[in-house]
Amino acid sequence: MTLPHHDHGSIKGVFFDFDGTILNSFSSQFKAYQATFRRFKIQITKSEFLRNYSPNWLKTYEAFGLPQHLWKDADKYWLKEVSRIPSRFFPRAKTVLLNLRKSYRVGLVTSGSKQRVLNDLCENKASSLFDVIVTGDDVQKRKPHPEGLLKALESLNIESNQAIYVGDAFEDMHMARAAHVRFIGIRSLFTTNLPSALPNVGDLTKLLRKM
């Protein structure tokens, strides 16, 4: 967790990663990757997936040796497979978002594809909980490049030093730092060794009250 001391009133926006942070999607994503790679004669195990997973799925394809000319076909197949296994918000995640909206602007900045992210938000009846949504399809450069987070800040007219980004991956932390935004880490199955991370997103409200 990277969180320098600031006055509570200086915070105007809280921005979130999606998968592993507020959406419990590890199981559905792993199964979708397994099915996708199997289609291209590549077998993967859970431990291999954990070692090579990246929020930028193209890096995951590359790590497992999938030729680049097959990536578009893999994308289509992965989206089809992941849609078969609905993912749900973590317990208390929706309550946290509703509580935060009373005091802050709330945004979603994710590397996930727009189609899949919007579908998951709809399934969880959470589309209206965010003031801005930036997906991997809305940027030229994905995490850890800060383009997505900077775009979300600009859309809400919030300065970097007035925002917090919450995520579960090293790419999230590096993106926040590159954008000069404070970062709070959340433990997840996707990234088990993120330093000083909160046990779950449900603890976020309590932390913000102490600031």
Image (cartoon, rainbow, N blue to C red):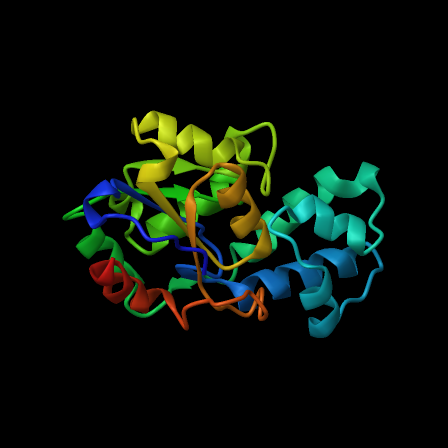
Point 31% across, 68% down: residue: 203
Can residue 115 be spotted in the picture?
Answer: yes
Quadrant, the N terminus: bottom left
Residue 198 % position (x, y): 41, 68
- Given residues 188 and 122, the one toward you in this image is 188
Task: Using residue 135 as the reference point, say whether residue 200 is left or right of it.
Answer: left
Point 23% across, 48% down: residue: 7
Dividing the picture into quadrants, the one containing residue 131 is top left
Residue most extreme to the left: 102
Quadrant, the C terminus: bottom left
Can residue 95 be spotted in the picture?
Answer: no
Point 54% across, 37% down: residue: 136
Dividing the picture into quadrants, the one containing residue 200 is bottom left
- Given residues 44 and 81, the one toward you in this image is 44
Across the whole image, how many numbered discs are drawn on residues? 0
Task: Using residue 125 as the reference point, say whether residue 80 is left or right of it.
Answer: right
Residue 35 % position (x, y): 69, 61
- Given residues 18 and 5, the one toward you in this image is 5
Point 26% across, 58% down: residue: 208
Residue 67 % position (x, y): 85, 44
Residue 129 % position (x, y): 26, 46
Q: Against 141, is 102 above or below?
A: below
Q: Against 22, is 196 above or below?
A: below
